[in-house]
């Protein structure tokens, strides 16, 4: 069985992430979306909120599961018996960081290889931080995040003075 992991912060999941997950699900028998719980980062959404949003977004993709992890990705991949770590690449600017991470992970876990999927062109500019910054000022994020979680993200992040309903 070919098992892959799609790791990330997913704070929150975007349509760009979902596109990578959907494409990975076509390539591998089992895909685990692995949400990093990092005590050093200060995410906008709790791990449980991120898990819940991702689960709703991937509902209907039968070979995808969603979990949290902490510690090293290389250890988590070993624990999951995953042969592949899938990462999306948007632009050359992503490359150096991703390349460094892939090499370090391979050094720590020779049984897992990192595979990069090129972003779909329409999501090249998209990131979780961009979504948060738009939502914070009351902007429309419906083209950037899965429809089923769009309202929740807007409501959570929009500052009161930009919120029509307040
Ligand atoms: O969505 P992100 O923030 O780009 O994802 C980064 C992530 C979670 C894949 C990366 O930070 C990670 O794997 N962290 C776990 C800790 C670890 O293994 N660090 C060493 C990697 S070189």
Image: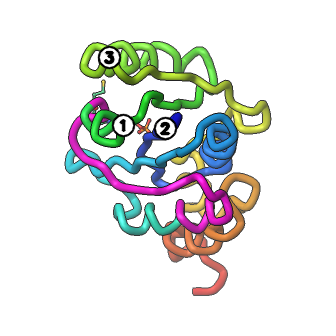
**What is the C-alpha distance between the residues marked 3 and 2?**
15 Å
Residue at 42% from the left image edge and 19% from the top image edge: 97
Numbered disc 2: secondary structure? strand
Bin the neighbour count of mark 2 within 10 Å (Cα to Cα): few under 14, some 14-19, many 20 and up.
Answer: many
Image quadrant occupied by the C terminus: bottom right
Numbered disc 3: secondary structure? loop
Along the viewing direction, whichever of 2 and 91 lies nearer the viewer: 2
Left or right relative to 101: residue 127: right
Residue at 54% from the left image edge and 45% from the top image edge: 30
Magenta includes 64? yes
Bin the neighbour count of mark 3 within 10 Å (Cα to Cα): few under 14, some 14-19, many 20 and up.
Answer: few
Residue receiving disc 2: 3
Left or right relative to 56: residue 7: left
Magenta includes 165? no
Lower position in the chain sequence, tag 2 or tag 1:
2
Along the viewing direction, whichever of 124 and 1 lies nearer the viewer: 1
Q: Give the image location of residue 32, x and y in percent.
A: 47, 47
Stretch in magenta: 54-74
**What is the C-alpha distance between the residues marked 1 and 3?**
12 Å
Left or right relative to 158: residue 23: right
Q: Is mark 2 within 8 Å of ligand 1?
A: no
Whether the residues at callouts 3 and 2 have beta carbons within 8 Å, the answer is: no
Residue receiving disc 1: 81
Numbered disc 1: secondary structure? loop
Residue receiving disc 3: 110
Residue at 47% from the left image edge and 28% from the top image edge: 84
Whether the residues at callouts 2 and 1 have beta carbons within 8 Å, the answer is: yes
Lower position in the chain sequence, tag 3 or tag 2:
2
Bin the neighbour count of mark 1 within 10 Å (Cα to Cα): few under 14, some 14-19, many 20 and up.
Answer: some
């Amino acid at each position: 069985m070919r098992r892959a992991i799609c790791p990330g912060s997913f704070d929150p999941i975007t349509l760009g992430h979902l596109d990578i997950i959907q494409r990975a699900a076509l390539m591998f028998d089992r895909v685990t979306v692995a949400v990093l719980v990092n005590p050093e980062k200060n995410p906008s959404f709790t791990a449980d909120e991120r898990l819940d949003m991702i689960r709703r977004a991937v509902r209907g993709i039968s070979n995808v599961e969603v979990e949290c992890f902490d510690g090293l990705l290389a250890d988590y991949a070993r624990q999951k018996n995953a042969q592949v770590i899938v990462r999306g690449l948007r632009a050359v600017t992503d490359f150096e960081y991703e390349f460094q991470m892939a090499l370090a992970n391979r050094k720590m876990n020779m049984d897992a290889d990192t595979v990069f999927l090129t972003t779909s062109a329409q999501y090249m500019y998209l990131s979780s931080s961009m979504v948060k910054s738009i939502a914070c000022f009351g902007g429309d994020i419906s083209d950037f995040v899965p429809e089923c979680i769009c309202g929740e993200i807007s409501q959570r992040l929009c500052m009161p003075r930009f919120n029509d309903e307040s």
